[in-house]
Amino acid sequence: MIARLEFAWDVDPESWARSAERDPGDCWPELPMYLSACMGDLPMIDAAEATPRVRGGTKLPDQLDGRLRFEDFWAIEVEADAWVRARAEGASYAEPVPAPRGRARLDLAEHIAWELFHLPGVVDTDAVLAVHHPYRDLYRPGDRNRGSAPGIRWPCQPRADGPAPRYGASPRGW
C-alpha cells in the first residue's frame, strides 16, 4: 500500500535555535533537512520496512512575520501486513496513536505525523504541525509531554542507551 501524507510546519526560528543550540538563521534549511533525514529513521518505518519518498514541498518558506512555515508531501510505501505487525510492536518516539481508527493506510499516515511531531529536534520547540492529507488535524505544543524529550541528535539516529523514548499523548481527532 502507499499512503500519502501532506502537512505544514509553523515554528519560531528562535524557539528552534534554543532547542537545537544553533543560530536562528540556520532554521531554514536545517529543520526541513532534519525532518527529511529522520523520516527514514523513524522506528515504525524501520520496523515495517517501509519506504518513504518525498513528493514535494515548499521551495522557499514563508518567513515574513519571523516564523518559519513550510510544507512537506510524502508517499510512504509498505506492505499492509508489515505495517500491522510493526504497529503491534509499538516502536516509537511517541506514544502510539490509539487502536487504528480505520484502514491501515490512514493509520500509517496518522502515526507517522505524530512521530514526526515528537522527534527530538522538534519536541522542545513551539512547532505546530498541520496535517492536510489524508486526514486533517492540528498538533500544538500543548499536545505533547515536552519534559521527557531526550537531547537533540544531529542527524536523527537511534538512541545508544536503549530503546526509543516514549512520551506524549495520543493525538486527538477533529
Image (spheres, helix red, strand yellow):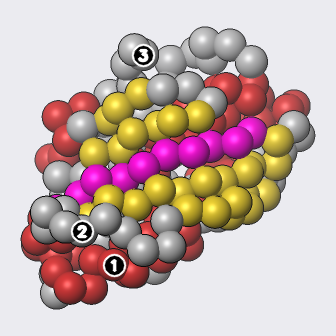
Q: Which residues are magenta?
A: 3-12
Q: Quadrant of residue 61?
A: bottom left
Q: Which residue is mark 3?
A: 173
Reply above or below: 56 against 43. Answer: below
Residue of label 1: 28
Q: Position of residue 67 (x, y in %)?
A: 19, 63
Disc 3, SS: loop
* Helix, strand or loop at mark 1: helix
> Mark 2 is on which residue type?
Gln
Q: In the rendered structure, does residue 97 fall within the stretch colored magenta?
A: no
**Can residue 166 be seen in this snapshot?**
no
**What residue is rendered at 62% in x and 30% in y?**
134
Q: Main secondary structure of the magenta part?
A: strand
Identity, as a three-letter code, of the amino acid under mark 1: Trp
The numbered disc on residue 63 is 2
Q: Are marks 2 and 1 in contact (CB under 8 Å)?
A: yes
Q: 9 and 86: which one is in front?
A: 9
Asked if labels 1 and 3 touch by Cβ distance under 8 angstroms, the answer is no
Location of residue 50 in the rendering, given as x and y in whole percent from the top left corner: 78, 52
Residue 6 among magenta residues: yes
Tell me the distance, in whole angstroms, between the alpha carbons under discs 2 and 1.
10 Å
Question: The residue under label 3 is which amino acid type?
Answer: Gly
